[in-house]
Image (cartoon, coloured by chain):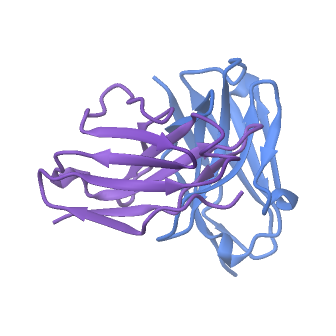
């Protein structure tokens, strides 16, 4: 159950796009289509932004999209807005009711 | 409306046992597709999954903390309890409970900060 690997930081100007990677193994990211992405603002609980690799919960803007190739999943935020500045975490189901989180990425809107 | 709320001590001493309770509403702990996980986040650090209990009472634990954790539930009270033994200052963190539905952790509680200090 090693943490999934994410870049520590990512940034972009308003209106631009930013993509965050999440690398795991064939036992988690590569083995299941249960990758989720969470947005966390300071002092707040994480909020689900993407589930099952690419699905968006109701209310999440379509500027947020997800994908997966092999053992690496990605979150893309298009048309960056100031309120998108936050920490982002990926998570994957890892079998038999086990879960694993990513190392987290701080997104800065320049 | 799905809600989860954590409760427990804000301060524990080293070597003590921590007991946290998660009270849920808006869904049943007996729902076949659902479960509850505990997750923690040390100040300024990443999220760490700790334990999970499924509707059929199946339990799973983080490999690194398995020897110290116990998760249980009382469906009639809509509560999930996590105990962690032999607390250490490195266990200082915000502890969250969250609902799981078929491989996805979706709804989260607000979290409760637990400080371990003598």
Picture quarter containing residue B19? bottom right
Can you give x and y, in whole percent of width and height, for residue A90 in the image? 49, 50
Say above or below: B43 vs B48. Answer: below
Chain B drawing hue: blue
Say above or below: A72 vs B41. Answer: above
Res. B100 in view: yes
Can you give x and y, in whole percent of width and height, for residue B46 in the image? 52, 63
Q: Left or right: where does residue A73 sit relative to residue A24?
A: left
Specify the chain shown as purple.
Answer: A
**Which residue extends farthest bottom?**
B118
- Residues B82 and A72: in front is A72
* Residue for point 82% across, 69% down: B86
- Residues A60 and B17: in front is A60
- Residues B26 and A57: in front is A57
**Which residue extends farthest right?**
B67
Res. A41 in view: no
The number of numbered discs placed on residues in the rendered structure image is 0
Can you give x and y, in whole percent of width and height, for residue A99 in the image? 66, 46
Q: Left or right: where does residue A37 sit relative to residue B31?
A: left
- The quadrant in which the C terminus of chain B is found is bottom right
- The quadrant in which the N terminus of chain B is found is top left
Can you give x and y, in whole percent of width and height, for residue B59 in the image? 81, 39
* Residue for point 22% across, 45% down: A78
- Residues A18 and A43: in front is A18
């Amino acid at each position: 159950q090693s943490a999934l690997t994410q870049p520590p930081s990512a940034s972009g100007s308003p209106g631009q796009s930013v993509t965050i990677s999440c690398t795991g193994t064939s036992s988690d990211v590569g083995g299941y289509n249960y990758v989720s992405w969470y947005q966390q603002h300071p002092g707040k609980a994480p909020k689900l932004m993407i589930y099952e690799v690419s699905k968006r919960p109701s209310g999440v803007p379509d500027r947020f999209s997800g994908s997966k190739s092999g053992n690496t999943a990605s979150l893309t935020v298009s048309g960056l807005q100031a309120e998108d500045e936050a920490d982002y975490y990926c998570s994957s189901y890892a079998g038999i009711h086990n879960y694993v989180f990513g190392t987290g990425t701080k997104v800065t809107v320049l | 409306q799905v809600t989860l709320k954590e409760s427990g001590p804000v301060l524990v001493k080293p070597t003590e046992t921590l007991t946290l309770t998660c009270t849920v509403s808006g869904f049943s702990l007996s729902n076949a597709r659902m479960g509850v996980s505990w997750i923690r986040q040390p100040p300024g650090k990443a999220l760490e999954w700790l334990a999970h209990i499924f509707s059929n009472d199946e339990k799973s634990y983080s490999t690194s903390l398995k020897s110290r954790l116990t998760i249980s539930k009382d469906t009639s009270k809509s509560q999930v309890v996590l105990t962690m033994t032999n607390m250490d200052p490195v266990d200082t963190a915000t502890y969250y409970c969250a609902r799981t539905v078929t491989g996805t952790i979706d709804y989260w509680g607000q979290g409760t900060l637990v400080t371990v200090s003598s």
